[in-house]
Amino acid sequence: MTVVSPRIEASWLEVLRPQFEAPYFAKLKEFLIAERQQYVCYPKGSDIFAAFDRTPFDKVKVVILGQDPYHEPEQAHGLCFSVRQGVAVPPSLVNIIKEINSDLGTQIPLTCGDLSHWADQGVLLLNATLTVRAHQAGSHQHHGWEQFTDAAIQALNQYRQGIVFLLWGSFAISKAQFIDRTKHYVLTAPHPSPLSAYRGFFGCRHFSQCNAILMKEGKEPIRWEEIG
């Protein structure tokens, strides 16, 4: 398996080139090759860097952080929280859609879960760990992916201005340490999981708040209702 996709978007490749060339990434690549030889892993190789491919570095307006890709068949396709058309919508994403409908007065069906249109509008849908072993959540954590994705967040923080970071749950909120709030915006809430959504994710109104910030920054708001 080739870990560094030749199709990774050019502006991200330029920013992340030092990571691809670092010793830890060589070890990560060896780990992933060994995993693929023994186990089914998600997403498929060509989708590992989908979040970067769909949302170029200079086009990022919003960042949503997840932790792991989905670990069941047909679910993961490289965008956090997203599933392709025709795949059953996971519970956390159902709750995200419920909050959008409540916040914005939309009527997005709870059967739609493809967030690719968000990515195309400038929403970086980034998991901290970009791969996972089938049926085993967290199985590829602590092998180097976090260092790679932390570097991506730090690059956005350093070289860009006025990005809105939507951090849901304690893991995502921990990444706020990399974000300069004098340059960027950070909105936090409990995770949309059924275990925690009722502790404050429902009613957080992050989607309308995010669009208000973007418009204040002179940027086009996100059309959150565009879910495939």
Image: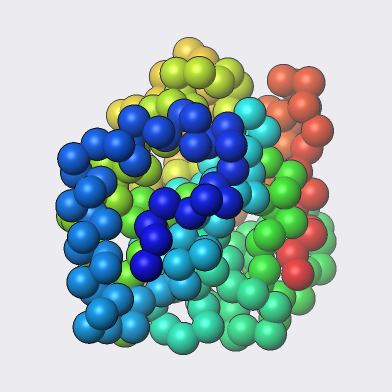
**From where the camera sits, is residue 191 visible?**
no
In the drawing, does residue 192 fall left or right of residue 172? right
Count of numbered circles in the view: 0
Residue 91, percent across and down? 51, 76
Q: Quadrant of the C terminus?
A: bottom right
Residue 203, percent across and down? 58, 53
In this rendering, the answer to whether 83 lies above or below 148 is: below
In this rendering, the answer to whether 49 lies above or below 11 is: below
**From where the camera sits, is residue 11 visible?**
yes
Query: Closer to the camera, 27 or 225?
Result: 27
Q: Name which residue lies at 55% across and 20% down.
A: 160
Image quadrant where residue 112 sits = bottom right
Query: Closer to the camera, 152 or 63?
Result: 152
Q: Quadrant of the N terminus?
A: bottom left
Q: Name which residue lies at 39% across and 28% down.
A: 154
Residue 220, percent across and down? 80, 33
Query: Closer to the camera, 48 or 67?
Result: 48
Name the colouring of the figure.
rainbow
Q: Name which residue lies at 35% across and 76% down.
A: 41
Q: Name which residue lies at 46% across and 29% down.
A: 15
Residue 83, percent across and down? 59, 73
In this rendering, the answer to whether 65 lies above or below 165 is: below
In this rendering, the answer to whether 195 lies above or below 24 is: below
